[in-house]
Image (cartoon, rainbow, N blue to C red):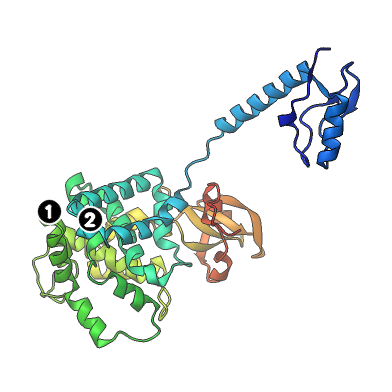
Amino acid sequence: MKVLRLPRAKVKVGMPLPWNVRDEQGLLLLSKGHVITNESQLEQLLTRGAFVDVEEIKASAREAAEAADALNAVKLPPNLFARWDQTSEALKKLLGIGVRLPDFPEQLDEFARQLCELIDINADVATYRIVRQDNAKHFYYGYAHSVHTAILSVLMARYLKWEDGPMMSLVKAALTMNLSILDLQGQMAGQDGPMKDSQRAAIQKHPGEAVELLEKAGVTDTDWLTAVAQHHERQDGTGYPLQSTEIGDLAVALRVADVLMAKISPRALRAALSPQEAIRELYREDKGGPISTAVIKVLGIFPPGDFVKLASGELGIVVERTANARAPIVAAITNTSGQLVSTTLRRDTSAAAYAIVGNASDKALLKRLPPERLYGYALSPTAVV
């Protein structure tokens, strides 16, 4: 047996010994894993003469290398929820000081492209974000609503096979359509009374004001500006502020996404509509036109984020769309008795035993449920378990 003197740097008081410790003749003094509890013990050991077997050191190094290789081989997907959580704050900063910088159009273009990249990583997670808003903060409503509208705009435009240029103009219009009233929207989302006259006046004129602010910031994209100007107009002339009947395709799509997102977002004064109710209202208004059809196709009858009850008696969250709009994949969060379970199980609702039988109503179960758990992502540092 070949031994080396125990390296002082490798021994930590209160920590297990990394190897067996021997005397100079190789006789065992302390076993691997033994804990030296104080500095006095450590000094006595080193003074007496502490050695380790060279082969044990080599074997330990091999084990550490193999463990590191195994850890590197298990690559968890990026925590998209943590990244999505940052989007509202990032947009708030960009539309604050950024709008006064000479490269604002380029900055917003980059923000829009990064948003599209997040959607591309997992469109179901993006959809979950716009549907599941139980813990939404009202004072961020204006910014979150803009991001959510942009997400739905991307999904709709892609389904309709729009080219990249018009789609990006639509996304940027969604992010900036409420530029003059973003903070007001947060105030209104949190207030427990009806809209005030001053608030109504600000709402009525915000499309034109937003266009003026964008033009001052250097925006020259006419499709972007026109969509913002017209996003509350209706083809029957009942919209505002101009009661126009000649409305561009981007403005029509933007109004639909804007209104749908508003209907499924909770406010202090009212609960959110279910996705099914909101889509049904849209479909009736649009008379089954291409825009409402696109919404149904990209969201499904039960979109990701929807809280549903299964034929098995389990409650779960829709996490993945399938080719069948009525039969998505659901992550069950309770057992058949309605009790929360520690491990979510994925259910294919095309199977009769797990078919969706309706929406679940007890949303208190969702308040402390980290969404990462449903998708297999590592929890973000701020996630509540």
Residue appearing at x 19%, y 63% in the figure: 252
Query: Are discs 2 and 1 less than 8 Å apart at CB?
Result: yes
- In the image, taking residue 214 as reference, residue 379 lies left or right, namely right
Q: Which mark is residue 221?
A: 1
Residue appearing at x 74%, y 21% in the figure: 57
Image location of residue 286, percent across then percent down: 23, 66
Q: Nearer the viewer, residue 283 or 116?
A: 116
Q: Callout 1, which amino acid?
A: Asp
Q: Callout 2, which amino acid?
A: Lys
Residue topped by disc 2: 172
Note whether residue 360 is visible. yes
The quarter holding residue 282 reads bottom left
- In the image, taking residue 270 as reference, residue 312 lies left or right, namely right
Q: Nearer the viewer, residue 180 or 262?
A: 180
Image location of residue 335, percent across then percent down: 65, 59
- In the image, taking residue 148 as reference, residue 219 lies left or right, namely left
Image location of residue 329, percent across then percent down: 50, 51
Image location of residue 355, percent across then percent down: 53, 57
Residue appearing at x 32%, y 55% in the figure: 151
Packing grade of label 2 (10 A; few <14, some 14-19, many >=20) is many
- In the image, taking residue 337 as reference, residue 351 lies left or right, namely left
Disc 2 or 1, which lies upstream in sequence? 2
